[in-house]
Amino acid sequence: MTTDNMELLLNVLHKTGLSPEEALELLNARLTHHLGFAVVDGGRGIRSALPEIVLASGKSTEEILDVTDSLLSSTGLAIVSRLEPEFSGRVLERFPDGEYHVRARMFVAGDYRGGPGPGEGSVALVSAGTSDLHAAEEAAVVLEVMKADIRRIYDIGVAGLHRLSETLPVIRAASVCLVFAGMDAALPTVLGGLYRGPVVAVPTSTGYGTAFGGVTALLSMLNSCSPGICVMNIDNGLGAAAAALRMIRSPE
Amino acid sequence: MTTDNMELLLNVLHKTGLSPEEALELLNARLTHHLGFAVVDGGRGIRSALPEIVLASGKSTEEILDVTDSLLSSTGLAIVSRLEPEFSGRVLERFPDGEYHVRARMFVAGDYRGGPGPGEGSVALVSAGTSDLHAAEEAAVVLEVMKADIRRIYDIGVAGLHRLSETLPVIRAASVCLVFAGMDAALPTVLGGLYRGPVVAVPTSTGYGTAFGGVTALLSMLNSCSPGICVMNIDNGLGAAAAALRMIRSPE
Amino acid sequence: MTTDNMELLLNVLHKTGLSPEEALELLNARLTHHLGFAVVDGGRGIRSALPEIVLASGKSTEEILDVTDSLLSSTGLAIVSRLEPEFSGRVLERFPDGEYHVRARMFVAGDYRGGPGPGEGSVALVSAGTSDLHAAEEAAVVLEVMKADIRRIYDIGVAGLHRLSETLPVIRAASVCLVFAGMDAALPTVLGGLYRGPVVAVPTSTGYGTAFGGVTALLSMLNSCSPGICVMNIDNGLGAAAAALRMIRSPE
Amino acid sequence: MTTDNMELLLNVLHKTGLSPEEALELLNARLTHHLGFAVVDGGRGIRSALPEIVLASGKSTEEILDVTDSLLSSTGLAIVSRLEPEFSGRVLERFPDGEYHVRARMFVAGDYRGGPGPGEGSVALVSAGTSDLHAAEEAAVVLEVMKADIRRIYDIGVAGLHRLSETLPVIRAASVCLVFAGMDAALPTVLGGLYRGPVVAVPTSTGYGTAFGGVTALLSMLNSCSPGICVMNIDNGLGAAAAALRMIRSPE
Amino acid sequence: MTTDNMELLLNVLHKTGLSPEEALELLNARLTHHLGFAVVDGGRGIRSALPEIVLASGKSTEEILDVTDSLLSSTGLAIVSRLEPEFSGRVLERFPDGEYHVRARMFVAGDYRGGPGPGEGSVALVSAGTSDLHAAEEAAVVLEVMKADIRRIYDIGVAGLHRLSETLPVIRAASVCLVFAGMDAALPTVLGGLYRGPVVAVPTSTGYGTAFGGVTALLSMLNSCSPGICVMNIDNGLGAAAAALRMIRSPE
Amino acid sequence: MTTDNMELLLNVLHKTGLSPEEALELLNARLTHHLGFAVVDGGRGIRSALPEIVLASGKSTEEILDVTDSLLSSTGLAIVSRLEPEFSGRVLERFPDGEYHVRARMFVAGDYRGGPGPGEGSVALVSAGTSDLHAAEEAAVVLEVMKADIRRIYDIGVAGLHRLSETLPVIRAASVCLVFAGMDAALPTVLGGLYRGPVVAVPTSTGYGTAFGGVTALLSMLNSCSPGICVMNIDNGLGAAAAALRMIRSPE
Amino acid sequence: MTTDNMELLLNVLHKTGLSPEEALELLNARLTHHLGFAVVDGGRGIRSALPEIVLASGKSTEEILDVTDSLLSSTGLAIVSRLEPEFSGRVLERFPDGEYHVRARMFVAGDYRGGPGPGEGSVALVSAGTSDLHAAEEAAVVLEVMKADIRRIYDIGVAGLHRLSETLPVIRAASVCLVFAGMDAALPTVLGGLYRGPVVAVPTSTGYGTAFGGVTALLSMLNSCSPGICVMNIDNGLGAAAAALRMIRSPE
Amino acid sequence: MTTDNMELLLNVLHKTGLSPEEALELLNARLTHHLGFAVVDGGRGIRSALPEIVLASGKSTEEILDVTDSLLSSTGLAIVSRLEPEFSGRVLERFPDGEYHVRARMFVAGDYRGGPGPGEGSVALVSAGTSDLHAAEEAAVVLEVMKADIRRIYDIGVAGLHRLSETLPVIRAASVCLVFAGMDAALPTVLGGLYRGPVVAVPTSTGYGTAFGGVTALLSMLNSCSPGICVMNIDNGLGAAAAALRMIRSPE
């Protein structure tokens, strides 16, 4: 949400005597744009921890461009996820100031103007292997756009325990730990037994055969022997970033 | 962990010049008890957000009693989960000062002596229906034992949206929201669009036919349109409580 | 079915003293064409709510052209579904008066001459997101060909509830509501609690990972907390259109 | 909803100048009862085609009695579904004027005072076998309580096609046809090719081995060659009844 | 098996005083060719109802050519199944007297010299739709090579029952009936109730969404209400042909 | 079908000049009994290879008795399958001349009066283990009632190949071979490579863990390397018997 | 196999000039007993690493007694697995010298007279939790009967890594390591990264919800990041023991 | 691990008085290389039976080259698995002394300098068909690099039992037997009944339809009637090779 919109919200609230619910309703109406094939929800960044993000898959390039345009105009920030490299050219052509992140398959244009709140914590992004980075980087891009403080700790799977041991102090210093792992996904369990903070586990589609495109990693994480491991959908780096933001941002 | 043990930890740390890692190792050794069929991990409450909890299923009653006894002696607190009512009699007979919670199928003896940390947040426990309470109450009992500040908001599923609307202010005031839902589990998505804080969703085994004992609710939650919803194993109230504790307790 | 055929039916019935069953049998025989690899069922539009529609997948282009030709000759209308864009050229070349609908992947040639019955209801087509439009438009094309009165209400998923609220009056005015949603498919449940008429829910293959190509949305819909939600196969817009026609057309 | 409540609604609407939305909100508030473990939604019968029905499974007998009592007081009608015979005694003892339907596993107390609307259609309940009657009768009881006009046509599976042929005229006369079938569920496809009206197919858990408790029947129905077959959850007679009511009741 | 080999078998048996088992062992040894990557089993046509058939998938083109060559030399007949069109050119180049059947994806070179036995029955090949012909033609090619007497009856699915009725006399005249159907696969059940002979049902991968590539059709067939329906793997036309040959050939 | 009915059929056919179709229709009508909850299909034994068999599961004892009575009166034979031992007492009390087969869980009353046709073949019943006998005996009882010539060859699984070798001559002499196996179900493949006649494979629910109640055995059989193995539903001995009857009985 | 039989084998081999294959055939014939419902394979202990073991499930008590008796007579040793406690009484009554192991659900009568071979290795049995002991003890009983040298190391799951560290020297001294774990089964991966010898992983049915009765543990083990982990069926302690024996016994 | 490193290990151990654990820690640190996106674990070949192998899938070509380079420098050997042919060119260009194995999809550069230990056993690689060779050759390449003594015995599936019989003596002479099979995977069971040594079964993705990409073969192997069969992930030739090395190498 842009600073202008933020000020609008304050004006509406303080000058007209509206209740917060009524102010939110007005704001929703003002920030909602009807494109026929889509209803762009520009106010989501106010109601929730993350602004609306455009899921590219299932949309035509024209539709992606129109929604991006609409979000950029109303909120000053547009993030497009799951944008395959072959479509990134046309998007960059239209929005030359934006940036395309290949590994994360994300396009970002504009800035998040909210800035980090006072005393917000840092986020550790831990991966079991190099093949998990597509998901980890999806989270990293979102968190960087949202101005969170992140640490990347990649390829420390438990088949070589010493790699985890030497990075434990960095992990323990973080407020939230996102763990990306495929195959048997044993890392979150070992980590969860050595770290007291919140662990958000993201199964990745790494592996073959009975890895079942990440289902095995998902099931393993859901049944972790270390209690309190939270689990996201397969390869859902974006969701993990949102979960981290929900945890480190102050709710109001 | 008992106050005595806490003091032991401090003594070990400050008087002997050990590094924290070395102190932890010593403590692990002192608090670990070998029963032959089990290795009781009395130090888990120090390393992680939750002390070791005894999973009753798959253990004989004798084994449950012995592990309970061992935990109670070393840490002053024993929690037994998934204890079916027909076995609760023998456990209560042995530990008459404990309490059995029927709906949560939990037995608790002793006290958690850690107390809440300064400025710890509150936890909202929200259920879609009355049939989800077995899981919600499992979380509630654990959180109450751990002296967390909880709110119960039960049976507000989205087939009657007005029930959710009228409780939103209470939910919004909580630091973490645990949502328990079976069947189509639509509640976390609607809630996640109206609440900025962390949402931990627990699928329940409520429903029949293609509810598949909670699998449908789990899948629905993993695919929530509201980004950042964290998901636990089916009926895993205990895990949700642990996740909440990881979030509201300060990491160190 | 063409007007000529309709008259034929009446003549057979009234002039020859046949019972309706016998007339139907005669008609079936006359309107059935044997192509060797296919038996074209030109009389289906009389026996059921929808004429035979050609499923392109699994057929060679030659076979598609021959069946289309046969239906067009005998009934004056041919609809081809699941026709991928790369094959549409050859079909349009052969039937230049037809139209190809890209998003719906449908080809239509000729006209439905039955016309709407007196007092037939309208159909609301509601989608949770833009990525669900391939299925929604498949239904829309069929309903438009069949001269039903439709309303398109797209991209109003419940992660932003206000988008649903503002369109409720339009939805409530419809006789039947078709809802298209992927991922967690929470929309039909919320809608079903606010709308008294029949709801036909179509899961879409939108999503990734544990969306399982629409299976999660399907399961969610089958387990809706709002009773009386009817469910179709994944991405089955055509079936949803047929269900709507069964509901709004008078049975006889 | 009772006649008294209906009048209340009219008064609120016409005398106080409230909009329908506001009136509904007031009504929701008045008809909602908070029992701590449940929020009884007495107004659901006004907003939707079916009043709230108590799902007994997952509730204690005390809870069932309390919710039943609350519904009976506020709306004059209470329906309890999935009530196993061994619990029916205590329910009948408390509500001696109610009736327990063994095959449908349903308890009904009080009356639906709405009555059928003018010109409402009839509902045909068709089963493939005798083993499907538990689901068919669940639908039948609900429809009878709601004063719908029903026809029972049981055990006419297509392994003996003549049984279907001789009942076709009765089926064709109905406005809606509910079909209950397990195993391969071939009946809805054959029926759907011979009947123009809406077909609601309910898979039943009849069969063994790869019948998978009704999953095979469900999948078969979702993939029916006859377009426009609507499908419900396994054994969901109640849902099928609700779907029928949505179709035959006038929406307003 | 060639006539020469047949004579060899007789000579071995009658002239050397060997038991049938010993003769078979000798024959196996003589007709088995070791290619390093494969052990070609030229004697299978004697021990079983069908000679060895080369499954092309998973083999390199070189390997396909070598095995084909080996079979042709030792038995006078080579059948290659699942040969995709793009590889057929090289195979035809090497064996220009052979024939490639596009729809069945089969290549055949040489002749079966056994000929039909006296009084062997005929085989009806029935398909529900045109999209099932890839599997039906795989069976047809094998049966024609093996000189069986076949009837093709295609596209008579039960959504238009009259198409089945008019072909029943032809079906009833056959000794064995192979039925190919995808989607809900209702045809074998209806047919099995009207035909007394053996029914071999082949599920096809026709359909989309919950058709699950033929799994739904398979499950439907396994749970047929008509007892005695035999089921093959999905799209396994070759296996159905082998089953038919086992039934119509005299065992010795 | 009783002799009396058989004569009726002949009379109808020869004396009244009816076509076979018309005669069948008349017969169907005469042999069909409407019990309200069931439509007993006494003519199935004429149209198909097996008379109607009463599936006990899902029926009340009263219903089982009524259907048995109806079949016995009209056809002289009643077979009840899946009748659990605890219900057999009441059935025997009502039909004291019948017999209950514990292992097969079948009740038989009356006689099949058709008798074997001239030159009918024999059926070999082969099981991999002793734990498969519940299914094998279900087939055996049906085949004995239908006066087929059967051979029992039990517990010859391929972990001890010599057990199979020594019984091969008996198997090879049979016209049809039914194979019952659970777990990995390797027996049908080995047998199918050594026997030329039709093989009907019945997966059994024997095993634990990933045996998945017979699903693994089913999948193994469907993917047999020996072509032409026919597969039935799990534990479906009755279906295997029906398949064998379809094969050994002359179609007319 | 008893000493007497061992001597018989030697006599047959050395005195009669038979080839080993012929001797084995003779022995198979002599040690095979036909009980009608079972063919007892007394020679399996010679051909394979483990004598025949009686699987109790799916057999009547009479059958269990008869097979046990047959094995005891011919080989001097009988092991019955999966014998539920309620049936152990009758077995002990008949064979009072045997022993019933409750946790392993195994009955053993007689002795294995083979003895350990020279230089055979030891087997470590490691479990993640106490709830896995039913499977671990099944393996332990078999290995003890077969006179293997075993070490029990129970309840050292990786949520508390120090429990594993302190037992590593014992594990590393073993020739083979059997690991029993349920839920997420992270233990074999961590162990496999710290131990060079063969690891046989046995998933257990410990856990609930998405533990799916051990399927999740199985999948996790199959996808272990530590290469070379061998996996057995769920709860298959017996199979793990057999695998260990195959590894530590000299093949000849 | 290179000879130089080996000497380093000895020096560290014997000259500095370190315990083996401390020496291993030092070595781990020295042989671990941090590339940012990967932490290369050069010491794995010392701690486990197999050095680290680079899984190409999920990595960019640049990353593959960098990790290969790092391993080659520190240990003198780099193995890349699952390297698709289209990427092999660039890898060979960079490491021209390496070799690419097409069928195994593996690249190998450098040498394993450990050499076989004294008295190490041989490994038999057995495949059921030619289509299983992609997995068998993956194991063969690894074993050859590790200087194991291997035997290839391909295409001896049990549909032609004589092919197995004639190779049994070679198989029986091996210390370990790796069996590769798809479809119904009956071969390991038959083999396991005829061979006393360890059997490692690798399911392959060979087959179609319900072969489910190797899942059926996997399930069949897990449920083998021959006890003690160890199972690997689908197509996991590399894992099977590692398992064999764990078995034939002396643990220390």
Image (cartoon, coloured by chain):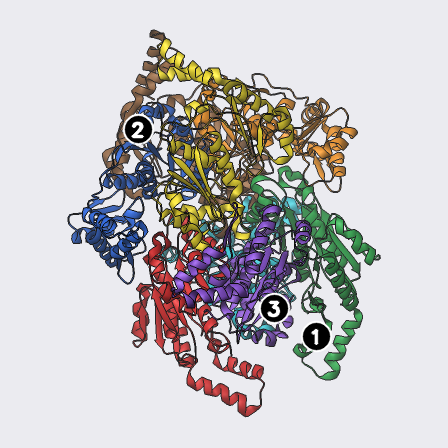
Chain colours: A purple, B red, C yellow, D blue, E orange, F brown, G cyan, H green
Give the residue at x 28% y 47%: D46
Q: Which residue is mark 3?
A: G174
Classify mark 2: helix, strand or loop.
Answer: strand
- The local crowd at label 1, few if under 14, some if 14 to 19, many if 20 or more residues have their Cα within 10 Å, is some
Q: Which residue is mark 1?
A: H29
Q: Which residue is mark 2?
A: F39
- The local crowd at label 3, few if under 14, some if 14 to 19, many if 20 or more residues have their Cα within 10 Å, is many
**The furthest residue to the right:** H96
Q: Can you say whether E6 is above or below B199 in the image? A: above
Give the residue at x 36% y 33%: D128
Mark 3 chain: G
Residues at circles 3 and 1 in contact by the CB criterion of under 8 Å: no
Mark 1 chain: H
Residues at circles 2 and 3 in contact by the CB criterion of under 8 Å: no
For badge 3, the amino acid type reads Ala
In the rendered image, residue B79, in percent from the top left (x then y), is placed at 39, 72
Give the residue at x 75% y 32%: E70
For badge 2, the amino acid type reads Val
